[in-house]
Amino acid sequence: MQTKLVPVSWHELTRRLNKLGWEGPFPGKKHPYMLKNGIFLLIPNPHHGDDVGIDLIKKIINRAGIDRDEWFEAV
């Protein structure tokens, strides 16, 4: 099992979040968002071919309350 965070595509990010129980993505004013148990999680805009960087992935999974093991299991 992988234990090092690596950049992922926007679609991979949303797919993993969906697998972990998050609903969406839904369109927002400036950024799309996802929902789970009343928690509102902003995610980056989908960029054409650009991956979501490691620092942003760390911020997203921390805000979402996802530990690293869960993130890697959601592959």
Image (cartoon, rainbow, N blue to C red):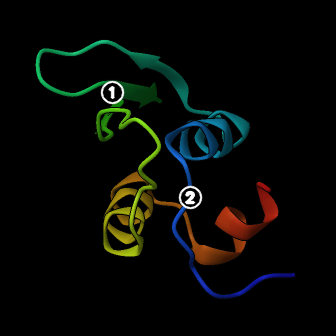
| Type of amino acid at the residue the image marks with label 2 | Val
| Type of amino acid at the residue the image marks with label 1 | Tyr
Q: Secondary structure at mark 1?
A: strand
Q: Residue at x 65, y 34 (%)?
A: 21
Label 1 belongs to which residue?
33
Could you tell me which quadrant the N terminus lies in? bottom right
For residue 15, side relative to residue 23 (left or right) = right
Cα distance in 3D space between marks 1 and 2: 17 Å
For residue 14, side relative to residue 59 (left or right) = right
Q: Secondary structure at mark 2?
A: loop
For residue 23, side relative to residue 46 (left or right) = right
Could you tell me which quadrant the C terminus lies in? bottom right
Quadrant of residue 61 within the rendered picture: bottom left
Where 68 falls versus 75 (above or below)? below
Where 72 falls versus 52 (above or below)? below
Label 2 belongs to which residue?
8
Which-is-in-front pick, marks 1 and 2?
2
Name the residue nearer the viewer: 8 or 15. Answer: 8
Q: Residue furthest bottom?
A: 4
